[in-house]
Amino acid sequence: MIILDTDFLVNSIKYKVDVISQIIYDYPTEKIGIIDKTIDELKNVNNLNARAAIHLVKLKNLKIIKTKKDKIVDDLILDYVSEGDIVCTQDLRLKRKLKEKNIKVLTIRQKKYVR
C-alpha cells in the first residue's frame, strides 16, 4: 500500500506534479490510499490547493483508510504502516520516524518528480 499524506497532496497541486501517474508508473501493482483524517485536514485548510487535492482524491478514486481519528494524521500513518508499505510525505519529522521503522518514503523532488 502507498499512503499519501496531506502536505504531499497539497504540494503536488502547488507544484503541478502529476504524482499519481508517476506512482502508478513506478509501482503498478500497489494500491494508493490516504488516511481518512487527511480529508478532514484538507477541508480545514481554506485554500485552492487543498480543495484541488480533495478533488484529486475523488477523481483518482483513492482508497480511504478508515481510522479512529483519535490522533494526528502523522501518528495515524505511523500506526497503520508496516514493512513493505510506502509513505509519500514532505514532512521531515515523519520521514525520520518512518525510516526508523524501515518504511520506504517518497517525496516530491525539485518540484518536478517523485522519488
Image (tube, rainbow, N blue to C red):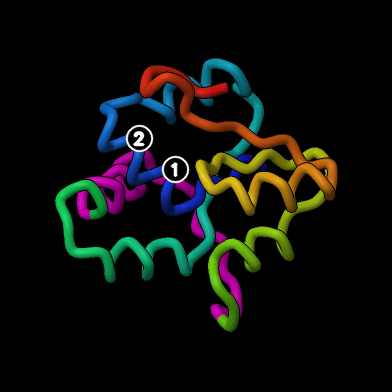
The three-letter amino acid code for the residue at tag 1 is Phe
Q: Percent x, y for residue 85?
A: 73, 42
Q: Percent x, y for residue 48?
A: 15, 50
Vertical comparison of 22 with 40: above or below: above
Q: Residue at x 63, y 67 (%)?
A: 76
Q: Residue at x 63, y 52 (%)?
A: 94
Q: Is residue 97 magenta?
A: no
Q: Element type at marker 2? A: helix
Q: Which residue is the site of mark 2?
A: 12
Q: Disc 2 vs disc 1: Cβ atoms closer than 8 Å? A: yes
Q: Percent x, y for residue 53?
A: 29, 47
Quarter of the figure with residue 18: top left
Q: Which residue is the site of mark 1?
A: 8
- Apparent side of residue 44 relative to residue 34 in the rendered image (left or right): left
The region drawn magenta spans: 51-69
Q: Residue at x 50, y 23 (%)?
A: 114
Give the position of the N terminus as an image quadrant. Answer: top right
- Apparent side of residue 50 relative to residue 101 in the rendered image (left or right): left
